[in-house]
Amino acid sequence: MMRQKPTNSDINHNAPDSGTAPEAYDVIVVGLGTAGAIAAIAAARKGLRVLGIDRHTCMGGAGTAGGVLGYYFGKRGGLFEEIDAKVQHTEKSVYTPSYGVGAEGKQYVLEQEAVLAGAVIRYDTTVTGVLTEGRTVTGLHCFSPELGSRTVMSKVVIDGTGNADVCRLAGCELQGGRAFDDQPQPFSNALFKLDGNRVRAYYTDSGYVFPEDPHSMSAAIVDSALLSTHLMDRYDNGTTYMRIAPQLGVRESRFIVGEEQVTLERFLREDYSREPLFMAYSNLDNHSKDVAFESELQRDWTVAASLWGLKFTVPIPLGALIPKGYDGLLATGRCIALDHDMASLVRMKRDMQKSGEAAAYAAYLAITGGVPLRDVPYPELARLLREAGCLEEGDKVYFEHRVAQADAAHSPIRWLEDPADIREALSGVKPGVAIWSAKRLGETIRGHLLQWIGPAGPEHLRRHSAMALALMGAREAAPILREMVRERDPFVPQTSLKYNQARGYAAVYLLGRLADKEAVPLLLDLLKSREGFAFIDGNKEFLSDEADLRFQYVSYALMALTAIGNRHEENRPAIAEAFGRFERELDGTLVISFKGSSEIRNVMDDKIRRLIDRTIRGWQSPAAVL
């Protein structure tokens, strides 16, 4: 028997709140974007009564309104594969074909599948409050211009807003941004253009935005549209620009504090769930270029070892979707329980769509089984996930290393353990995996590294061994690191496909990690000089020119001097004096480009002032900080 196509008119829209019973659903999905759209369809297909709410006027989020039409890693499998296949079929007969998954086609297919599954969709609707009994969410207050204020009851609410908006209204604990300045990753503002007879989306990083702040969001929308990448002085006659994407490509906002937090630090010490809903898969794709202000762990990974491009899988458990201490509420999409470091990996569209499907199945089992969300039996949930293709039998954590574009295959690798293998890799131009392997081995490899930094050794072996020793806190590495800084060593490793870090400023970072006070004169010289930074074109995507390179040296020198002053009180007066002089001379020339465009420059004076002022205040207080 064919299912009758339901419509939104099946619901009594005109009944006022006062004097009538509130509408009731099994599941309300708030935010019908990348994750929420899939969650609504999957929940409705399981026979649940589903209401989907969005303050915009289409489904799909970043993958439709945001103009992010392609996929960057993430693991295949799940309901989204069926949706995407239908989009391709639709484009053949209805919509202009696109490079990637077409925005208009996907909006159409998502809406069609949601309505066919029995979900009710309400656009132009904003959640204004959350109903709770204790710490169990039981429904929502919402508002739309057409219907006014409404109260809607539910057994489970799925927060697919991306910004944890519902979780915030419910009083859940949130966190986010990096420790230095709360900064998330940059956002993008996509353009649609006609390329031949197909639609192509083009975007660069356009700035920083805090999506939970309406003033920040409004400024980002307007300012990014006025950038030279969008509002050009002259348009090439060969390119037909169609429109700017109506939704910003936000990569990061706030995260819930969940029943289980997925962090980079825990993952790298192999403390992760053995009961995944899905396996997120990518590299640590942090688009920020002011990496000196990221966490020490991320600097170790990205700067000292140049492992930005190493891809790995991360198990995401149900606890990462449940706000800590709450029931009746699930988060899905980029706001799940992560930290800033891990969020650069766990945000890919494929994986976020899987998170929406997983949330739907968890809600289904909790509702039909009459159990709290945290007590949903994992074997049953895993069975549903495997049947859907979200989770594959034998899924496991692995690292994947692809060191050159020419590599036809990139097989999972293991960390190196044999000293001979480590020595060979440290002697070459792709030392990152060996550097991190040595860090993991610690004292068992220390003796070999000390031998390899001897003056008779090959240059790459000596210098890369010194970098590995520095990550282990070995002061014996300092003389070689100083040598690298003195030369402003321009060598750029080839460990990653891109975003490799020049050895000279990596050495600056590591001298700060060692708090090497003998390096102070060298580091102060870096602050005085504006020239002599040898830019190499081989790392063009990360560094656009000498100005970018100078910022890397200066920012790491400031951080290193801060670390040295924190450890060695006797060095503080000279460092403080140099900091004051440097701050007074800031003139807007210390800049960094954004990924994808050398035209857009971010003036770094305010961040430098923040660092210097915080450092000096810390030294003036009874207990130095930073």
Image: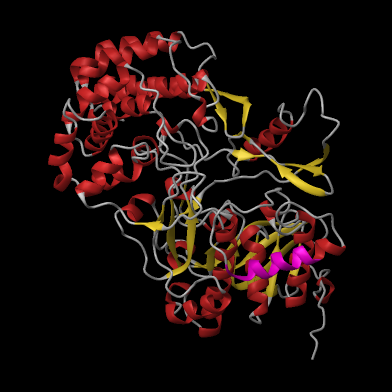
Answer left or right for 83 relative to 297.
Answer: right
How is the structure coloured here?
secondary structure
Residue 507 is drawn in which quadrant?
Answer: top left
- Which residue occupies 72% across, 73% down? 119
Answer left or right for 507 relative to 330.
Answer: left
Asked whether 533 falls inside the magenta stretch, the response is: no
Q: Is residue 136 visible?
A: yes
Is the C terminus in the top left, top right, bottom left or bottom right quadrant?
A: top left
The region drawn magenta spans 77-89
**Residue 47 x %, y %:** 66, 82
**Residue 434 x %, y %:** 29, 44
Q: Is residue 439 visible?
A: no
Answer left or right for 415 relative to 110.
Answer: left
**Residue 455 x %, y %:** 17, 25
Q: Is residue 303 above or below residue 533?
A: below
**Along the line of sight, the residue nearer the viewer: 481 or 425:** 425
Residue 304 is drawn in which quadrant?
Answer: top left
Answer left or right for 316 relative to 118.
Answer: left
**Residue 297 x %, y %:** 34, 42
**Along the line of sight, the residue nearer the viewer: 445 or 299:** 445
Is the N terminus in the top left, top right, bottom left or bottom right quadrant?
A: bottom right
Dominant secondary structure of the residues highlighted in magenta in the image: helix
**Along the line of sight, the residue nearer the viewer: 385 or 573:** 385
Q: Is residue 586 above or below residue 32?
A: above
- Which residue occupies 83% across, 69% down? 14
Asked whether 82 falls inside the magenta stretch, the response is: yes
- Which residue occupies 87% across, 61% down? 94
- Which residue occupies 25% across, 48% down? 421
